[in-house]
Image (cartoon, coloured by chain):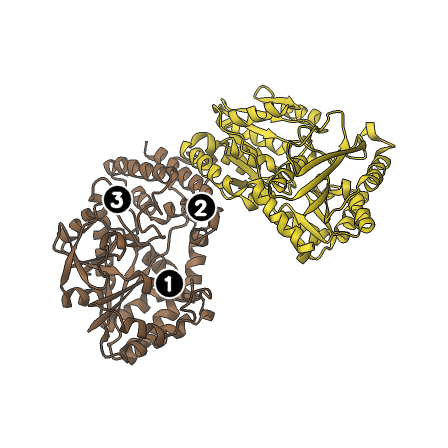
Chain colours: A yellow, B brown
Amino acid sequence: MKVAMIGWEYPPFKAGGLGTHCYGLTRSLADKNVKVDFYMPKTKHSAGGSGKRNLVIKEVGETEIFPYDRPEDKELAGQFFESVYRYNDLVVERVKGNYDLIHCHDWLTMKAGAALKEKLGIPLVLSVHSTEYDRSGWICPNDWFINIEREGMEKADRVIAVSHFTKGVIVDKYGINPDKISVVHNAVYPIGEGEKQEIVLFLGRLTIQKGAEFFLRAAKKVLEYEPDSRFVVAGTGDMLPRLIDQAVDMGISSKVIFTGLLTEEEVKHIYRISNVYVMPSVSEPFGITALEAVSAGTPTIASKTAGFSEAFQNCLRVDFWDTDEMANKIISLLRYDPLHKTLATEGKRELDLFTWDRVAEKTIDVYNRVM
Amino acid sequence: MTSICMYFEVHQPVRLNRFSVFNIGNDADASPNYFNNKLNHEIFEKVAKKCYLPTNNLLLNLINEFDGKFRISFSLTGTFVEYCERFMPSVIDSFKKLFATGAVDMIEETYFHSLSGLYDDLDEFEEQVMMHRQMIKRLFNYEPKVFRNTEAIYDNRIANKIGQMGYKGIITEGTEKILGWRSPNYLYRPINSDIKVLLRNYPLSDDIGFRFSSRHWPGFPLTADKYARWMSRCEGDLINLFIDYETFGEHQWTETGIFDFLSHLPNEALKHEQLDFVTVSEAVDRYQPVGEIDVPWAISWADADRDVSTWLGNDMQFACFNELKDIGKKLKKRGDEELLHVWRRLQTSDHLYYVSTKGLEDGDVHAYFSHYDGPYDGFINYMNVLQDLKQKIS
């Protein structure tokens, strides 16, 4: 089996779950004797070789757009849409070879995927890692993205959703036949444990989607009862200045550390030393970061609507807006060692079910259904 | 002759209010408000309508129809009886009617369906058994002869204690762990007591309790004549069928045909000349032990493990259990009757059952019985309540 896979990011350079997923998936597919040519934009950071016989990384042209960019970002103004079209055209031109199917990921590559399906006359599989509704936090979603997404979903022979939650969005908001959608939950390469400190961690893009403001509100409440606890907001994004202001206004700025963008090694370190991880996303198709935290022995409190919390049993669940309950659970984790220990131990055990091997197996099942 | 000994466990747990860390120590002087009366009331009424009332009615008719040849036994927990008296006295009346037929026996247990049999000493256990004895005496003017501990939890120590307290029989699980190659269809004797041990025939009991409506089971559909035929082929003195009473109409809905099954069972069983029905007291009167059992570590009828890991299987459960025991020691010195009763209601084994992480990934039976979003929420809520109670007495 030979697959032309079209992505947008690939480690070491990545901005989110899409890149992590593509990395784990393609490597495990290659191990299972599926030949994959992975097409992606050329970036300043060269992707380098894959180190796998069945996996070839092919860089096509240059672009400055990333899957989580918004057209309203100033630097891109004026050329955002053009860049997307240009990249998609380039991909259509460059993808040549004897493939059994095309597999593309999220809105950025959907146009190319649909065009290639017609050009090469082979099936198209589409993975949905997030939708415009998620990225906008369900506030004023942009029709331009939605239309691209809908067209891609309609043209795809099969759609892979990263959770039942996302499958529901694809059915309800995009009107896609549920029988055409397979759910394949994400996985993780375990990080390993470290020496824990009294740190409560938020890690993610600081966008409306990720709900860091709710994390700060919970922190305020926790600090009234556990004044020695510390909070870390790791990552960057358009909300950063507002979040700093919020921490100052609430009088907790001395207890909250904003790290800015972290390197991959720093990310691993902060997972390892944190005591509690909180993922208060307003909308979260899956949330691989939660799996990463668990793999570092850090119990996780996740938003009820996150794909992660539907798939993973050994976690605590909250409504993202219920910051009192979030604080209740953070304090419980700080106070009750047996709770912390059981979540950490059972969580790591459950991770055995979340391997990229399993993701690859399920993805191959999907491939077999369209071929 | 092989006697069928059917016994039903009738219990409702004491569900708790949502209690966050912010509630701890908030009103130190007021009476605690831990118990979710609204939810407990709602569920009790629902189960009463689906199970208790219709099943009692059916059993009463069957006993009358077969002129007392159909005989059964019940164990009613104290928490269950409290709900009856508070929310629906007609349920207790219907049990009284059943008992008045003379074909129904009552079994002793701890009033609070607790794990007090596993405490370091058995004083509290004995007190709770005595409370249950008084309750049965008050309701039925009867003193049970046979004891069954919470979820059939049993070890040598408990058996010895129950023997000392004057009971003739004690019930537990007929697991291979204690029987080895031997059959559960006989009475046995503990190594350290003269009491007789009745052992649950778990394959036949679970055919009704768990597998009845399972389409993947080769025995499906289970009919009364088929089941009676299976029993007629059993070797031994006794077939002990011990079943959750809520099986009828609640765990197995009416639509599964569970009531039809039950209504035909006496007739189909009595068609076989070698089968009859006995109550638990009659079983221990009629038959003699055939061997000894030695149970140094506790067993139960719960989960596939048949031990106490359902309640004491992870660190969270041990932490709550130890906290509960410590609070008890302090409370007994204080002698505050109201708080003592609160503490005892917090001993109901269900509180720890909800905190079990066993089989979590498979979403098995534990989730079905829990009103929490998983064991971790169960722990936080229960532990918060225990912390509040601890503050009240310190």
Label 2 belongs to which residue? B17
- Dot 1: few (<14), some (14–19), or many (≥20) neighbours within 10 Å? many
Quadrant assignment, res A233 = top right
Vertical order, A71 against B246 (above or below): above
Vertical order, B5 against B295 (above or below): below
Q: Identify the amino acid type marked 2.
A: Asn
Q: Earlier in the sequence, mark 3 or mark 1?
A: 3
Locate residue A161, reporting x and y percent.
Answer: 66, 48
Label 3 belongs to which residue? B118
Q: Identify the amino acid type marked 3.
A: Leu
Q: Residue at x 27, y 37 (%)?
A: B331
**Residue in the foreground of this view, choosing between A317 and A346:** A346
Q: Identify the amino acid type marked 1.
A: Gly
Label 1 belongs to which residue? B209
Q: Measure the alpha-carbon separation of dots 3 and 1.
A: 26 Å
Q: Nearer the viewer, mark 3 or mark 2?
A: 3
